[in-house]
Image: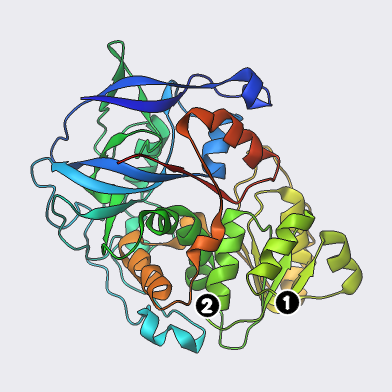
């Protein structure tokens, strides 16, 4: 079938991207879904730093590549074996990663299951699904960690620009076009592996559903899966972009006092408008001497990481969820880790199992405790994607959404 989508032609183009135009909008051919694959009509897609990091060259991917990974849509066709549990649907057991009903104790719970993908519900045509940018095979060593490590097979497919099974379903002029993180959502339709989606109930609007798959899963997952705060713990978030603000919203939904840190005044104001009562610039934070037992670094910047480590209280945990440039380097004192019994934790995709965690965040939203809509800063057209990347790079946007016509 013919689709319309946004293709990155080359990585590392100079900014502003509105001038260099590395992304082109045009017609592509999309193959029908194969075994364990779905055809999804894209309703909403979010513009994320993981897209920008490919455009600016911080994450080198094969080109041409149809971008986009944070999205929601409607299943319109299914390949063989695609309707049941995901291929990744392994043997995860959860001993209380709470449904939202018991999340009010300040902790969403403990997951110590061996499996990596949970037990997703069967999918049928007409279902709304959330895209997830790291599919899980359910069988590798990474999937056996309950979310702590990414899937080895999914990571290899993402790096190669294919779907989970190694397939390429996109073409232009007879030549293949790479998939972005197994999704390629900046298009009217996508073919994805069954393991790359999670079904949500129809009461969850598409705009909310899209954000659950990346911003909330990553930022919120860093709080509940990686930091694992105790009731009463103060949580500091350094870097108040889309992922950082998602961490803020989840921490607030669980009843924690939250401290927001960012160098951009508008982002501090955004945090205050969401209920954060204590905010600092990095310079103000150093001068104040304020520290917290849980500090989430969500800026993807080496200096922000250093700020987060310095601001972590004795016995506390620093969780880094940002993705800096591969050659970025930070300087910390190893002595403080020993002398103050501190821990630094890396959290990729919020150490999440999407089929486990997305429904729980959806429940928090449904109860009115997680106002995901506050992450939306603008709605843009597909044709304006280069300009949207500039807004993201310049710190002028949280989440810009592309809303596709029905």
Residue at mark 2 to residue at mark 1: CA–CA distance: 14 Å
Instruction: Read off the residue under disc 1.
Output: 277
Quick one: SS at disc 2? Answer: helix
**Residue 53, placed above or below residue 173:** below
* Res 60 visible: no
Left of 222 or right of it: where is 183? left
State how the image is colored: rainbow
Instruction: Read off the residue under disc 2.
Output: 253
Residue drawn at point x = 61 percent, y = 30 percent: 56
Left of 67 or right of it: where is 251? right
List x then y, in percent, for residue 202.
26, 62
* Res 21 visible: yes
Quick one: SS at disc 1? Answer: loop
List x then y, in percent, for residue 36.
16, 44
Residue drawn at point x = 43 percent, y = 20 percent: 64
Q: Which quadrant is the C terminus positioned in?
A: top left
Q: Between residues 18 and 294, which one lies in front from this camera angle?
A: 18
List x then y, in percent, for residue 22.
55, 21
């Amino acid at each position: 079938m013919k689709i319309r989508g946004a293709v990155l032609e080359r990585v590392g183009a100079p900014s502003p991207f509105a001038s260099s135009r590395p992304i082109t909008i045009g017609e592509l051919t999309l193959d029908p879904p194969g075994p364990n694959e779905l055809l999804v009509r894209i309703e909403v897609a979010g513009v994320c730093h993981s897209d920008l990091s490919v455009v600016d060259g911080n994450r080198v991917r094969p080109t041409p590549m149809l971008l986009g990974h944070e999205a929601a849509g409607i299943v319109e066709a299914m390949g063989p074996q695609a309707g049941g549990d995901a291929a990744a649907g392994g043997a995860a057991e959860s001993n209380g990663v709470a449904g939202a009903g018991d999340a009010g104790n300040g902790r969403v719970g403990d997951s110590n299951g061996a499996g990596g993908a949970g037990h997703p519900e069967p999918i049928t045509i007409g279902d709304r699904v959330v895209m997830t940018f790291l599919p899980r095979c359910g069988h590798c060593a990474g999937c056996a960690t309950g979310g702590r490590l990414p899937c080895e097979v999914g990571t290899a497919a993402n790096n190669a620009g294919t779907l989970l099974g190694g397939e390429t379903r996109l073409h232009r002029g007879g030549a293949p076009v790479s998939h972005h993180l197994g999704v390629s959502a900046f298009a009217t339709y996508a073919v994805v592996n069954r393991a790359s989606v999670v079904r949500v109930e129809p009461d969850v609007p598409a705009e909310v559903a899209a954000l659950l798959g990346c911003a909330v899963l990553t930022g919120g997952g860093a709080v509940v899966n990686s930091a694992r705060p105790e009731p009463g713990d103060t949580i500091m978030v350094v870097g108040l972009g889309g992922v950082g603000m998602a961490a803020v919203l989840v921490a607030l939904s669980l009843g924690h006092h939250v401290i927001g840190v960012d160098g951009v005044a508008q982002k501090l104001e955004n945090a205050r408008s969401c209920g954060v009562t204590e905010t600092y610039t990095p310079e103000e934070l150093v001068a104040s001497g304020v520290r917290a037992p849980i500090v989430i670094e969500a800026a993807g910047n080496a200096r922000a990481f250093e700020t987060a480590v310095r601001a972590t209280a004795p016995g506390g945990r620093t969780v880094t969820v940002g993705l800096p440039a591969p050659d970025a380097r930070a300087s910390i004192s190893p002595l403080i880790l020993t002398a103050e019994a501190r821990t630094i934790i890396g959290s990729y995709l919020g150490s999440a199992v999407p089929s486990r965690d997305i429904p729980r965040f959806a429940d928090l939203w449904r109860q009115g405790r997680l106002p995901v809509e506050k992450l939306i800063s603008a709605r843009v057209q597909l044709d304006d994607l280069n300009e949207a990347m500039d807004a993201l790079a310049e710190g002028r946007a949280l989440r810009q959404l592309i809303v596709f016509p029905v």
